[in-house]
Amino acid sequence: MTYRYLDPERIITEAAYWRFPGAAVAAFGEGIEDEYFCTGVRKLGESAPFNEDTMFTIASCSKSFTSALAGILADRGLVDLDSPVSSYVPDLQMWDAAATEKMSLKDMLCHRTGFGAHDVIWPAPYSRAEMARRIRYIEPADAYGSPRALYSNVMYAMAGYVEETVTGKSWGELLKENIFTPLGMSRSDGSGKVLAADANHAEPHYYKEGEVVPVPYWNVDQAGPAASVTSTLKDLVRWVKCHAFGGVLPDGRRLISEENFRRIHTPGAAYPTLPRIPHPDYRSLGYCLGWQKGIYRGQEFQRHGGKIEGYSSLMAYLPAQKKGFVALVNLHCPPDHFFQGLFYSLMDRFLGIEASDEPYFPKEGDKAPDRYYHECELDIAAKRLDPALKGAPAALAPDKLTGVYENKGYGTVTVRQEKEKLLLHYRDQELPLLHFGGDVYVMENVLADVLTMRVPVRFEAHPLEEGRAQKLFIGYDDTVRDILFTLRREG
């Protein structure tokens, strides 16, 4: 293939520098043949190559599908992007009465609800309907109507629930009928189960203790509308191209009405993100509905990235030029540096500007330094624990900490003792509690969306029932105070 936009040699060099197991990049432009370049393998230690038909989890790029589906349902009169969702999904109520009364699909899809992250509540072993019933008990990070975007996977899961409720169909069925089939995206699905069963799929990888290794697949289908779409490089080109051409299918029919397509791609909240590699001619204009809008060298672009447990992705396009690209890497962290450099390089080529021969990111030796591989780690415990407490003796014996603790929004956590270890089970993880000092512990390797966290865990006895823990506080979210769980059953 003759490449007009892609630079295969440069992609190979970058992939080696960042230790990517595999990388796949595609570019397209009006009137030219789509360009594809893939390098590396689907799984380290095996020889199967990563190609344009390899199935891949696209994580938060899934949000563009959920927002498009909202536009399609709005075209049919089944939803109104600006009406309160409680008017047709009454069981979805928020902590804040104003949010319950006024929150719209648009608010949810541009992250303007004030809810915030609370990412540890998913993926959970219950339905999105049950998640909707629990939301009202979770204190938001900000007030409803705040002009800044507070990124929320939970609210996207709930937007998918709204779509399911008004149609009586599953979110996956809606995607297939309304998006995948019309666009010919035959190797795309809304569930990770399909990926795991496919013979040609990329395995997730992490950088651990100085090397890149495969990690188990993390199924996040319960929060699917935020993160669980599986697709391929070739299918995603069809998707991004549809947006670059204004929501029009290859046969000329509209996927989404012109009015609702415009609304989906209009910023609804401030989103002042800074790219990994700053550029004087790059700035964000805000978060739209499932897309981020910005300006690069005076030209409007739309983009969205995705990252989840071992997978990273980016899609972007220039609407005025009808040009764009997709990039997929089966490594968790740090592909963002590669993606941002690739963005600048390809945007320059799309705009007819001679691309620089400089690396996407300044090199420091033959391989990227270790520090770049820890950018998705968050130590909440270090921020919240008093160093003076470290090593202090505990007032409560370990066997007085065990039991089942409950929070109406977060559900239950179980603390149990196994020989000399205390273990805490929540959601799909059971992790050791490491004594910090007093009745405070630290829990490591907590998964929350893209983050691996170190969190504080504090037990508290009832004043009249000394010697037995009655309350448990866990710092599961950096944007809100520690979450309170109350003892329901002794262990």
Image: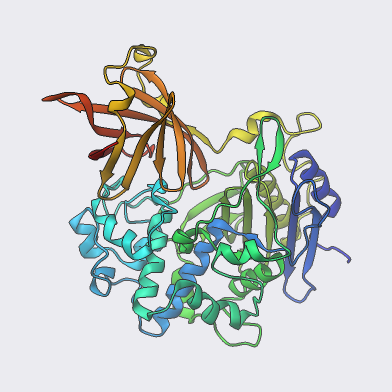
Camera-nearest residue between 365 and 317: 365
Q: State the image coordinates of residue 139 (x, y, percent, origin top left).
A: 26, 47
Q: Residue at x 55, y 38 (%)?
A: 376
Q: Residue furthest left?
A: 464
Q: Residue furthest front?
A: 419
Camera-nearest residue between 388 and 391: 391
Q: State the image coordinates of residue 335 (x, y, percent, origin top left).
A: 66, 45
One can see residue 146 in this view: yes
Q: Quadrant of the C terminus?
A: top left
Q: Residue at x 49, y 48 (%)?
A: 449
How many numbered badges does the structure rendering display? 0
Q: State the image coordinates of residue 38 (x, y, percent, origin top left).
A: 79, 58
Q: Residue at x 51, y 61 (%)?
A: 291
One can see residue 482 in this view: no
Image check: 303 left or right of 349? Answer: left
Image check: 215 left or right of 37? Answer: left
Q: Residue at x 61, y 54 (%)?
A: 296
Camera-nearest residue between 199 and 72: 199
Image check: 209 left or right of 52? Answer: left
Q: State the image coordinates of residue 325 (x, y, percent, origin top left).
A: 69, 62
